[in-house]
Amino acid sequence: MTAVAEIMDYAEVVERYDPVLGLEVHVELNTNTKMFCGCPNEFGGEPNTHVCPTCLGLPGALPVVNGTAVESAVRIGLALNCEIAEWCRFARKNYFYPDMPKNFQTSQYDEPIAFDGHLDVVLDDGEVVRVGIERAHMEEDTGKSLHVGGATGRIHGAEHSLLDYNRAGVPLIEIVTKPVTGMGERAPEVARAYVTALRDLLRAMDVSDVRMDQGSLRCDANVSLTPKGSAEFGTRTETKNVNSLRSVERAVRHEMGRQAAVLAAGGTITQETRHFQEADGTTAAGRTKETAEDYRYFPEPDLVPIAPSREWVEQLRTTLPELPWERRRRIQQEWQLTDEELRDLVNTGAIELVAATVEAGADPGEARIWWVQNLTQQANSRQVELADLPITPVQVARVIELVSAGELTNKLARQVVQGVLDGEGDPDEVVDKHGLKVVSDDSALLAAVDEALAAQPDVAEKIRGGKVQAAGAVVGAVMKATQGQADAKRVRELILERVGA
Ligand SMILES: [Zn+2]
């Protein structure tokens, strides 16, 4: 099984097969404490410092359900248009793995807290696709293994492994879609758009920090292919823990091409987990997938069932924030955006950043230009999400303020933003550090104007003779002499005054 994986050309894949997707997203909740104990729920920390007998699974330790986590689960279910169970239980999912100290994961099985909903997803061209939600259930996260001594960081080839249980017992919600069918060639895009929409929704609800790079939002993508005209789903593979939105799309697309090549050659698809490899965009085989029976699920005897009263559920419904798509419609009206402008904002991931910049006092038009143009380019060249650029909406708003107050030119403003991105501090600190203020002192400007006019006497003569547009050359010379730190409009005024035009 060392053969290099063949990939079928994408156009041929979608001509011969219909892709079926199933997306499983795990979200770490941002509760103060873990799911079944009082340990802090914080990312990072010295290994094994956020642990106690319960989350270490020591004999005799008993779990207690985190009420806030249940509340978040119900709210997420409601936001996904799900039914909320009147009565449900936790279940033990048994498996032996070093990062699972109890040798079972407390999860939910056939009695999820939320089920049968949907999420409307907007594609890049504005088309809306409704993705069915099978269930959203509560569970706990595992610890983390660190494999030491190998070349790849994987367990294969490692000399030894270290375990950190800080993450063990962190509250998770697993959100599972119904099979997503009929998407054809757009299936990879639908997968990305779905995870994007879910991330935006959860962020707006403030139930998780939804950081894919830190693992607080993780997507497993199930992909199978059905030959055109067949009604039966093919065997699926599950690509695990794809850790960026872009990777979700790449992983699905790659897996479609790989499976098609296997099927077309007369092979069969093995039901297995696969790992997405960021470097080359391919997937590699992991373990052969267990079936539900292998986990020996049974109801958790140490926890009471959960029976959310209808009054409480309805009360929680009133706490749902303005949902992202409703908010977008409102913003479009308030900022008077065309459909295309709104789409650019959404597709670049800029909408909430622009909104926060406007909230910090900036003009919507200016804020939009900064985020959609300059900063999007910066994010692309650094290969990070726009929101992960090391600049805040408040800082962008300050730069815009400095420009509109005439203290920075647009060119200087770009330098200030660059400084902020390079970690030189707030805009005002960058301005001070590099002396980037506009030269607004007329006497300093006049000296430069006089020098430029003296250097170009013929131009000065033209201006005097009424050819005011000739002043451009002198403005250029002054801007160069002041290293772009002059206000061009003021320079022009001074030139005209000086030659008496
Ligand atoms: Zn604990």
Image (cartoon, rainbow, N blue to C red):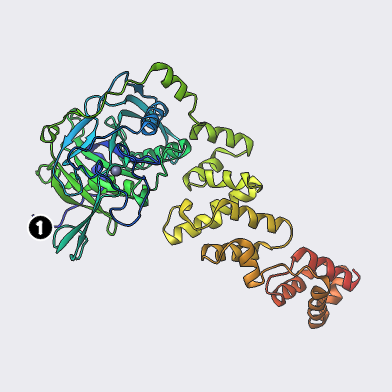
Instruction: Name the quarter where the C terminus is drawn.
Output: bottom right
Q: Position of residue 82 (x, y in %)?
A: 36, 24
If the picture is divided into quarters, which one holds ligand 1? top left
Label 1 residue SS: loop
Q: Position of residue 281 (x, y in %)?
A: 28, 54
In this view, the residue in front, 364 or 268, is 364
Q: Residue at x 84, y 69 (%)?
A: 494
Q: Position of residue 180 (x, y in %)?
A: 29, 32
Q: Residue at x 57, y 51 (%)?
A: 393
Side of 186 where 327 appears, left or right: right
Q: Is residue 314 above or below residue 32?
A: above
- Residue that carries the numbered disc 1 in the rendered image: 2
Residue extending furthest front? 60
Side of 95 where 122 appears, left or right: right
The image quarter in which residue 3 lies: bottom left
Q: Residue at x 12, y 43 (%)?
A: 270
The amino acid type, in three-letter code, at marker 1 is Thr
Q: Is residue 469 visible?
A: no
Residue extending furthest bottom? 455
